Image (cartoon, coloured by chain):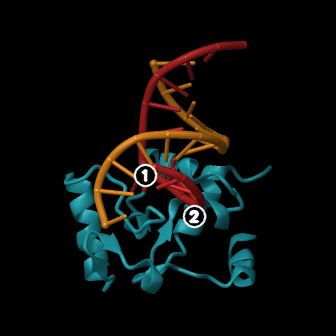
Chain colours: A cyan, B red, C orange
Amino acid sequence: MSMTGKQAILSVLALVPAGYVVSYGQLADLAGLPGRARLAGTVLRRADTSALPWHRVVASSGHISLPADSREAREQKERLLTEGVVFRGNKVDMKQHQWRPDLGALLVLLDQ
DNA sequence: ATAATGACTATTT
DNA sequence: CAAATAGCCATTA
């Protein structure tokens, strides 16, 4: 029985460390679903992410993709700031904080 | 089966 | 740098 895209995405999300972020497209890529950024967004919107670091996912530009000025968007920024993530204006400094996992190690972690 | 929708993105204005 | 544009593709209607 094979893993669903949703499961793969949530599995990778669980591994994103504090102080780092991933983009939706990157999350899909790492989950073995290239070109499916929108699926990553859909999964995050629908799934129960209460036990996961959902706030570590932002647009590739560094922008927070939740509705501007929504309660969720504010909470995301607050959580990131608490973890030491630096913003330049309203965007995460991706240069500094985008997660770049060792792909080999990631494969081992997921293949179980 | 078809069409609209969206926590997307790279490119072009 | 902001805004529009054109691809994108699973999910929903």
Same chain? Circles 2 and 1: yes
Q: What is the x, y in percent for residue A36?
A: 63, 51
What residue sits right under mark 2 in the picture?
A: A27
Q: Secondary structure at mark 2?
A: helix
Q: What is the x, y in percent for residue A6?
A: 60, 51
Q: Secondary structure at mark 1?
A: loop
In-front residue for pair A42/A91: A91
Name the residue located 72 percent from the left edge and 61 percent from the top edge.
Answer: A32
Give the answer, above or below, for where A55 lies relative to B7. Answer: below
> Looking at the rendered structure, which numbered label has been put on residue A90?
none
In-front residue for pair A110/A61: A61
Image quarter hosting the C terminus of chain A: bottom right
Count of numbered marks: 2
Which residue type does callout 1 highlight? Asp
Judging from the image, mark 2 belongs to the subunit labelled A
Residue C2 vs residue A26: left or right?
A: left
From mark 2 to mark 1, how far is it between C-alphas?
A: 17 Å
Residue A8 vs residue A16: left or right?
A: right
Name the residue located 25 percent from the left edge and 81 percent from the top edge.
Answer: A82
Give the answer, above or below, for where A5 lies relative to A61. Answer: above
Give the answer, above or below, for where A23 lies relative to C9. Answer: below
Name the residue located 57 percent from the left edge and 48 percent from the top edge.
Answer: A39
What residue occupies the far right of the structure in this picture? A1
Tell us which disc is closer to us: 2 or 1: 2
Disc on the earlier residue, 2 or 1:
2
What residue sits right under mark 1 in the picture?
A: A48
Residue C9 vs residue C1: left or right?
A: right
